Image: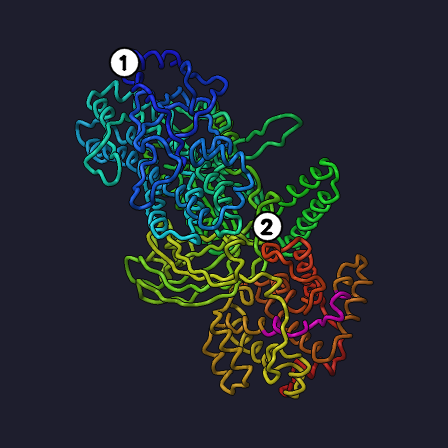
Amino acid sequence: MSKRALTGRRQRRGRWAGGPPRSPCPPRRPHGGSDSGPPEPPAAGCEAEPGKSSVHPVGCRLPADSPKSPVDRQPDALFGTPPGFGCAVDRAEEPRRPQDGLPYIDDSPASSPHLGSKARGSRDAAEPSRAGELDLEKGSEMRKWVLSGILASEETYLSHLEALLLPMKPLKAAATTSQPVLTSQQIETIFFKVPELYEIHKDFYDGLLPRVQQWGHQQRVGDLFQKLASQLGVYRAFVDNYEVAMETAEKCCQANAQFAEISENLRARSNKEAKDQTTKNSLETLLYKPVDRVTRSTLVLHDLLKHTPPSHPDHPLLQDALRISQNFLSSINEEITPRRQSMTVKKGEHRQLLKDSFMVELVEGARKLRHVFLFTDLLLCTKLKKQSGGKTQQYDCKWYIPLTDLSFQTVDESEATPSIPLVLDEELDAMKIKISQIKSDIQREKRANKGSKAIERLRKKLSEQESLLLLMSPNMAFRVHSRHGKSYTFLISSDYERAEWRENIREQQKKCFKSFSLTSVELQMLTNSCVKLQTVHSIPLTINKEDDESPGLYGFLNVIVHSATGFKQSSSLYCTLEVDSFGYFVNKAKTRVYRDTAEPNWNEEFEIELEGSQTLRILCYEKCYHKTRLAKEDSGESADRIVGKGQVQLDPQTLQDRDWQRTVIAMNGIEVKLSIKFTSREFSLKRMPSRKQTGVFGVKIAVVTKRERSKVPYIVRQCVEEIERRGMEEVGIYRVSGVATDIQALKAAFDVNNKDVSVMMSEMDVNAIAGTLKLYFRELPEPLFTDEFYPNFAEGIALSDPVAKESCMLNLLLSLPEANLLTFLFLLDHLKRVAEKETVNKMSLHNLATVFGPTLLRPSEKENKLPANPSQAISMTDSWSLEVMSQVQVLLYFLQLEAIPAPDSRRQSVLFSTEV
């Protein structure tokens, strides 16, 4: 049906046209950026009544007949009356009308509503210097007024969503009877994502209200806005569905008089206190509210940021929320109408994009980079076509599976299978070095103000290396199977990601009932639509960021996993912790198994090393000792079942004070309590000599060996002996963190020469013993390779000629002090024996070099002092990254040497004598 015909039909029926007269008093400017905005000149192509200002950008017009909510009604007794508002509090909104199609969304700061009246605005313009002289209390008061308006606006918005939800339940109940008003599919289409939007904003309102009630200039609200911005994806789904929802509602009103009556008489509360006072709204008016709401997601943030000092803890969080909102709005602005048309399928049904991501597919033993799209009814795997000059981006369809035909293949996926081509860690490390070097070159070109062509060439190289790293790094299988017999294998990096895809697919499968096949034309249309629909536009690596974004954290993160609640029944439970590094996630720690409980109290602390990390993930598992306890479709997974997962963004601004911060992670009805504390690499890796020279930690290795009359310190020998006795087959030995309290207990015992230390070690988790050994080397006042020789080792490893490199490296090694050399040789042989069990413990020579390299080589003092700016101290430069990788390469070189020509008698006495 044409747009003109549809418009004419609406006017003839009378339900979609007409509206209340405008109020003679101009609308006041809202203080919270809620349901109204400042008058603006009409944009190009936007119809406006003569003599009246348009209040929305192109195409963004409200239904003319929509009864409007009071503008930002706020409880004066609670918040006080903001100055400078001349119009009545219950002034109605400016009426707006919808266009056919969806709105163009204006997220520019220019459209942000401003606080105060014109008089105050003029005064501020005339005296701009006074704005910077506002004292802390006045700024805090302005923030409170802005937030008061936001609360009032949220209250009104929630009442509108409640009015939409009210008829849903009886309509759903009637759908199962012999005389349904609407079918279940029609209800799902018309009210799509409304319950989710209500829950999101109810949580936001419930979190914000008590904070504003207990207001103070140090009160924080940024986390609430950041969380709200992170959930804008629900609005994407709603906006994508908006046009088809309106078409479905109109058709249902024509076909069913009862539903037409319902849709014209929806009641919304006027405000929270006046429960009996309601206003009548049409379904069309209320369905437009979320569209109107999302167009204003940046406006309140602009106002709030304007009155939040840069030094306030909320400032970076609000900036992040604003960035997310602006990116979201710009992404859904592009050619909205063609996008919707391309996704409309036969019989009035509508296909929505739920999730998309770059993934690695295993095809006949080769890794292939794919872009995978999960729609409401199918899973689509595509390949991005190579672009020639001037051509737009295009996808090729590789395969698709209707969700009704999809299952998860029942094979053991707990480990990488032999069919998966594993990439050597050395190759991955070489890619990381190249990426760091290219980034460093880009920064150098920028500082030199070179031309954009040189920088673009470097960016292209960076993108190629990032794509290669993404392609080669994952090795965990995620297999999907079509009931028609074809199976496909993806390679991903973590259990978290695999569980997320499975949950999303299974949740959507509950709503799918029919199998189908697409014609070649339909498949081509679907693939073409992916260009516009995609939400992930670039390789998702932490290093692929704009210059003003945080490059991640480098240092150590202490995490205490306290407890968890919300389990419905007792079971054996444990948690694992993952952090990202160069775009993929690595398992870093695991709590003990808490048996037969619904309220585990682990209270275990871990120290996790971060390498450009931005996210901490936590997964909660139920320990399954018998696979028969798992559902048949899950029988191929590891014996343990994921019962919850969540994540925390590691924000440099909030973590810079190095104090413990307590947080609660909600996951599927389960809540896990954590405490986290971050120490940047510049602080954490500073070697500090111990004041107490009678111990072993922080004391020079020569002093310890002389006191003990041994060649190798007792602590090193004891830890190595215990690990070789029962830890050689422990998965992730030396990589997985031990419990920090156990490590500190062992440290104290060794420092006082406790005779029972061997008994203590036998009763502790082997990861704690490995952690104690690493801590000993990390706290040496001088590295094992010494400050004197460190620069020479760094230069030697960079030599190109293999003969010259071997000569240089061996001569340097044999020049170390005797205690340092013999201790290193002892440790070296141990690490080689650990790597011999790589098929079981997953610790290759390269993995061990990554763990021990910085610990054994990092110099005790840096020539450059700590930066004065704390944020610089947290976000390590690329030179740091290159230095760490050099340290890894030095240790890896010696691990890979078949033999080190040390004097036989000297070495034999170290490795095999009982009197070491």
Image height of 148 relative to 7, above or below: below
* The one of 698 and 513 positioned closer to us in this rendering: 698
The C terminus lies in which quarter of the figure?
Answer: bottom right
Q: Are marks 2 and 1 in contact (CB under 8 Å)?
A: no
Q: Main secondary structure of the magenta part?
A: loop
Residue at horizontal 49 percent and vertical 77 percent from the top:
745
Residue type, numbered disc 1 = Arg
Q: Is residue 871 visible?
A: yes
Image height of 846 relative to 306, above or below: below
Which SS class for mark 1?
A: helix
Report how far apart the C-alphas of labels 2 and 1 lie in the structure.
58 Å
Give how far across and how far down residue 444 sits, in percent. 72, 46
The mark found on residue 551 in the picture is 2
Which residue bears the numbered disc 1? 13
Q: Quadrant of residue 81?
A: top left
Q: Is residue 409 visible?
A: no
Mark 2 crowdedness (10 Å alpha carbons): few <14, some 14-19, many ≥20: many
Which SS class for mark 2?
A: loop
Numbered label tally: 2
Give how far across and how far down residue 469 sits, in percent. 61, 48
Give how far across and how far down residue 660 sits, in percent. 47, 63
The N terminus lies in which quarter of the figure?
Answer: top left
Mark 1 crowdedness (10 Å alpha carbons): few <14, some 14-19, many ≥20: few
Lower position in the chain sequence, tag 2 or tag 1 = 1
Please give left or right for residue 115 compared with residue 891 in the image.
Answer: left
Q: Quadrant of residue 396?
A: top right
Q: Which residues are magenta?
A: 776-793
